[in-house]
Image (cartoon, rainbow, N blue to C red):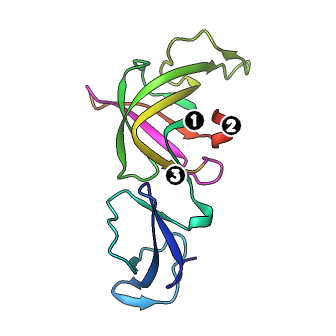
């Protein structure tokens, strides 16, 4: 829940401010809850770009250029270690990325990890690492499905390469 006077931080910039007032449909309201569509008026003149995230300073999501990723389902064979675009945290935040590692392919029949795999094919599951050109703000998928998921898109063809879930920072190394 957010109320006027609450402290918030704008991510990924890290600028902090307070909520001056909250409106819904142009009408002032006392509080906003998850899933509500509202307008937040901030106390300071802060640059909040499309796709930025507001959070409470004490409960910020993780932010960084390297996000541990796992259970990446390949929609088609990907060019591992190739350039891709990724969408994480919000449907409007895109960044360029490079798949830097395929740790293993997961065999759903045996539960085995194939560390010798060089790519994920269509419908394969595996654990990958992606390095992004701009910081990615995210939560672990188990905590928040919206901010904990991602898609990878081949920049050359604009085809979806994969979709997946993000791990907590400690789990990803």
* Viewport quadrant of the N terminus: bottom right
Task: Give the residue at x 35% y 52%.
Answer: 92
> Residue 143: image x %, image y %?
64, 53
Q: Secondary structure at mark 2?
A: helix
Question: Dot 1 corresponds to which residue?
Answer: 68
Q: Residues within 10 Å of mark 2 (few under 14, many from 20)?
A: few
In the image, which disc is placed on residue 147? 3
Q: Is residue 89 magenta?
A: no
Task: Give the residue at x 52% y 11%.
Answer: 118
Instruction: Please say if 80 is above or below 138.
Output: above
Between 131 and 107, the one nearer to me in the picture: 131
Task: Give the residue at x 46% y 80%.
Answer: 19
Question: Dot 2 corresponds to which residue?
Answer: 171
Q: Pointer 3 and pointer 1: residues touching (CB < 8 Å)?
A: no
Q: Earlier in the sequence, mark 3 or mark 1?
A: 1
Q: Pointer 2 and pointer 1: residues touching (CB < 8 Å)?
A: yes
Q: Is residue 152 magenta?
A: yes
Range covered by the magenta-colored residues: 140-156
Between 76 and 144, the one nearer to me in the picture: 144
Q: Residues within 10 Å of mark 3 (few under 14, many from 20)?
A: many
Q: Secondary structure at mark 1?
A: strand
**95 to the left or right of 58:** left
**Magenta segment main secondary structure:** loop
* Viewport quadrant of the C terminus: top right
> Residue 35: image x %, image y %?
50, 69
Q: Earlier in the sequence, mark 2 or mark 1?
A: 1
Instruction: Please say if 116 is above or below 43.
Output: above
Could you tell me how far apart the alpha carbons at marks 2 and 1 are, in whole angstroms?
8 Å
């Amino acid at each position: 829940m957010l109320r006027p006077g609450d402290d918030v931080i704008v991510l990924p910039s890290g600028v902090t401010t307070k909520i001056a007032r909250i409106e819904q449909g142009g009408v002032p309201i006392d509080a906003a809850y998850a899933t509500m569509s509202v307008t937040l008026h901030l106390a300071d003149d802060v640059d909040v770009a499309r796709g930025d995230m507001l959070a409470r300073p004490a409960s910020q999501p993780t932010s960084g250029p390297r996000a541990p990723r796992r259970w990446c389902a390949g929609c088609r064979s990907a060019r591992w270690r190739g350039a891709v675009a990724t969408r994480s945290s919000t449907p409007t935040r895109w960044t360029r990325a490079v798949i830097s590692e395929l740790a293993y392919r997961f065999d759903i029949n045996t539960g085995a990890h194939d560390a010798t795999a060089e790519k994920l094919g269509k419908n394969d599951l595996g654990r990958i690492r992606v390095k992004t050109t701009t910081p990615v703000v995210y939560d672990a998928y188990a905590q928040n499905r919206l901010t904990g998921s991602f898609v990878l898109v081949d920049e050359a063809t604009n085809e979806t390469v994969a979709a997946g879930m993000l791990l907590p920072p400690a789990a990803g190394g």
